[in-house]
Amino acid sequence: MLSEPKQILVVDDEPNLRRVLSAQLSRDGYEVHTADDGEQAEEMLLEHHIDLVITDLRMPKMDGMQLLRRALEIDNNLPVILLTAHGTVDNAVEALKTGAFDYLTKPFDQEEVRSIVRKALRTRDLSAQEASVSLPSAPSDAPYGIIGKSEAISELYAILRRAADSPSTVLVTGESGTGKELVARALHEHSSRAAQPFIKVNCAAIPKDLMESEFFGHERGAFTGAVASKPGRFELADKGTLFLDEIGAIPVDLQVKLLRALQESEFERVGGIKTIRADVRVVAATKSDLKKEIANGAFREDLFYRLNVVPIRLPPLRERIEDIPLLIQHFLLKFNTRLNKQIHSASAEVETLLKGYHWPGNIRELENIVERAVLFCDGDRLEVSDLPSEVRASVTPIEHEPAPDPAVSGDGLKEQVKAATARLERELILQALKQTHANVTHAARLLKISRKGLQLKMKELGLREREERVET
């Protein structure tokens, strides 16, 4: 099945420029919408699902900066590319610090347009996959915008409190959808750099031959398509925070230059000879195992240790299932507003079923499932029937041993209580092992007992053989 073409909105008060850009983008297979001022563009953003905005900086009624801010209010993951003349490059750089994806200087090269559009759309796609559920409506008792009261989240809060205002580099690891960007933003916003730029780069979205220019900038004529000098992300992040997402995608030859920039706080633009200094706090993130990448020769060990000064591991949702009810309620509030519904809660059966699900897509997947359930729910409470069939089918109930009827048992009260307690302990341990995929360490954390204590209890209950499948 063919995918729908990406939709691009071109905004400029010059009809000829709109025609030229529209023609090129249409030839490249995109669906193009046009607007001649910011107010018209805002209307189109509300009417259409736009994947990318390309807008002039200077326009009547609503200029490019105002449109940029409005576009990010509508969709904070929407990439916006600014068009600027040579005399307004400083304004474009300021726009990047505000949240624009990039800028193009007039007159621009067709290949430069093609490259930056591909990169922007690729970044948007990756952001959707990695979305970290950073929502403005997070409860007031979630001081870092991170929802949860589990032991894992409490430990994360403790690290953030200590690390936020430190200049030390941070390496955030975790599966897709666990909230790596959210943690990076929390570190920035709770530091003394909060009023300075937060610049993010998705390393997996950048072509390898353009990555050095993306990081360190380039001088005019440094390569084909470099029609003007341009600062890199390190310069733009000066005095602020640079978030390098998917750091493992950086090629080995560039890792040497990145290491120098981190150690010395200086670099040169591509094609330049002037050394530039920048005061940048770096937060890196990856879903890859960088130690394996080091063993395979794909990642430098010295760079790993330079980045891993403050390591933060984000647990997958299946390791913090006690947070699922809080997250469900949070998403209900969000989608009640968006979908004009009044669903006050989810049934106990829904919560139980979702706690038993594996969550390969983590929080992002939970958000999508709740949105879909809210959309199809006809009542004021989510029921199991509102959940997607694939989720209902993936969770099988635990097989329980039939409990003897105490009324017909000949044992005394003490013996019956002991037997019932053992059955309950066995059931709870089996449930924890199921939810953590037989990982004893994670199951012990879930049950709030020590690993050794769980091992002894498993031996006592005849469950020790399960330990052979454990990831330690």
Image (tube, rainbow, N blue to C red):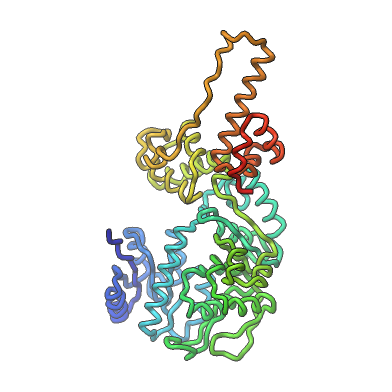
Q: Nearer the viewer, residue 141 or 249?
A: 249
Is residue 198 visible in the rendered structure shown here?
no
What residue sits 57% from the left and 34% below the top?
430
In screen coordinates, is 291 left or right of 39?
Answer: right
Quarter of the figure with residue 264: bottom right
- Where is 398 relative to 105, above or below? above
- Where is 419 relative to 271, above or below? above
Count of marks, rendered view:
0
The picture places residue 196, in percent across and down from the top left corner, at 61, 69
What residue sits 57% from the left and 8% below the top?
408
What residue sits 62% from the left and 8% below the top?
410
Q: Nearer the viewer, residue 112 or 317?
A: 317
Is residue 273 visible in the rendered structure shown here?
yes
Quarter of the figure with residue 200: bottom right
* Quadrant of image for the N terminus: bottom left
What residue sits 54% from the left and 40% below the top?
435
- Where is 325 relative to 338, above or below? above
The picture places residue 119, in percent across and down from the top left corner, at 43, 72
Quarter of the figure with residue 64: bottom left
The picture places residue 102, in percent across and down from the top left corner, at 47, 74
The picture places residue 128, in percent across and down from the top left corner, at 44, 59
